[in-house]
């Protein structure tokens, strides 16, 4: 059984909305204390989902108008990493709120660059102000106060690069495996460039290897997002790794001119390259992660990596091919 962390969260969040933050914090604390990454993987994932429901109630949506964007900012990973390393609920909640604000800012900015709709830029600007206020209200000052601006500026380069890929796609260019990997890793670089810096400032056990695992994990999640967004991305002419791989075999014009209900079929079934390239990426990332040493307190991050990789393979491949690829990854590890 494979499930995404984002599944089942929203269905059960409403029952917590009537609770005050004090009671929610108490519930969060109880679940966090019961977390044990030595548990069976799916048990741990299920506990993460329960925790995320509470965390999303503790720090509700920025705007009901852009709820879909905001829901993508829900991720308990950084909260759990902080709690496992510090055993401090208040510190973990602080990290969660800051990372969520940063994620909101990047997602809203991303939407602005995709759609050119000013309302996304205006909300992103408000979130940016909240980030500054959030940092100023912290009693223990650290380098986050002056370094996050630089981190966010670093990531802005991705949106320019994304436009280059868009233009090349529309011009009928094809993309090699290395180009697809480069795009995916650049797209997911908000994890090491921005969010990991928060852990760097707050976690005693943090190392850059942790940042590297978080980068690969985000890359796997971005692959999953691209799988889900194939039709939407083609309609908007936005880069999508499955489409980038497919144009080796099928022209982008053929994909673009298809009806919405046929786009996915053309991308995935008329192209031998699409699935093969992405599965190769998943296997490469998973194999690399398994060879990265990180502190024991944060070992759950590598378990999440396996979960994300298994989810992707289970989504993309038939059961028989899934088992075959799993054996390949196992042999690479030995």
Image (cartoon, grey):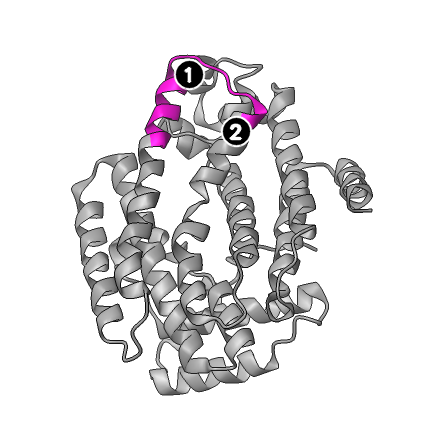
In this picture, residue 105 sits left or right of residue 44: left
The verdict on residue 174 being magenta is: yes
Residue 325 lies in the magenta stretch: no
> What is the quadrant of residue 313 in the picture?
top right
- Name the one closer to the observer, 327 or 322: 327
Mark-to-mark CA distance, 1 and 2: 23 Å
- Helix, strand or loop at mark 2: helix
Q: Is residue 128 above or below residue 90?
A: above
**Residue where numbered disc 1 is placed:** 257
Asked if one can make out residue 265 in the rendered structure from this viewpoint, the answer is no
Residue 180 tag number: 2
Magenta range: 161-178
Q: Residue at x 36, y 52 (%)?
A: 68
Viewer can see residue 172? yes
Choose top left, top right, bottom left or bottom right for residue 64: bottom left
| Residue 62 vs residue 144, the one in the foreground | 144
Q: Quadrant of residue 132?
A: bottom left
């Amino acid at each position: 059984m494979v499930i995404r962390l984002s599944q089942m969260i929203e269905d059960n969040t409403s029952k917590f909305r009537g609770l005050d933050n004090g009671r929610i914090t108490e519930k969060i604390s109880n679940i966090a204390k019961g977390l044990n990454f030595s548990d069976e993987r799916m048990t741990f994932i299920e506990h993460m989902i329960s925790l995320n429901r509470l965390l999303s109630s503790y720090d509700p949506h920025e705007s009901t108008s852009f709820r879909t964007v905001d829901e993508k900012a829900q991720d308990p990973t950084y909260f759990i990493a902080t709690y496992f390393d510090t055993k401090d609920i208040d510190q973990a909640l602080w990290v969660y709120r800051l990372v969520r604000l940063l994620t909101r800012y990047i997602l809203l900015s991303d939407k602005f660059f995709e759609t050119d709709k000013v309302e996304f830029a205006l909300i992103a600007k408000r979130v940016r102000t909240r980030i500054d206020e959030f940092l100023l209200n912290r009693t223990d000052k650290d380098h986050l106060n002056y370094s996050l601006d630089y981190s966010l500026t670093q990531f802005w380069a991705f949106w320019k690069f994304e436009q280059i890929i868009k233009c090349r796609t529309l011009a009928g260019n094809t993309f090699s495996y290395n180009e697809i990997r480069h795009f995916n890793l650049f797209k997911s670089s908000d994890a090491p460039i921005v969010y990991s810096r928060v852990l760097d400032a707050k976690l005693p056990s943090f190392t850059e290897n942790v940042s590297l695992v978080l980068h690969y994990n985000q890359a796997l999640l971005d692959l999953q997002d691209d799988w889900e967004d194939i039709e939407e991305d083609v309609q908007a002419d936005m880069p999508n790794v499955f489409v980038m791989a497919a144009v080796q075999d099928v022209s982008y014009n053929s994909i673009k001119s298809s009806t919405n209900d046929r786009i996915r079929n053309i991308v995935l079934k008329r192209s031998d390259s699409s699935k093969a390239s992405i599965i190769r990426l998943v296997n490469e990332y998973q194999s690399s992660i398994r060879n990265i040493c990180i502190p024991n307190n944060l070992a759950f991050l590598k378990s999440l990596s396996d979960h994300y990789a298994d989810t992707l393979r289970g989504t993309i491949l038939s059961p028989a091919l899934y088992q075959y690829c799993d054996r390949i990854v196992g042999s690479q590890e030995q």
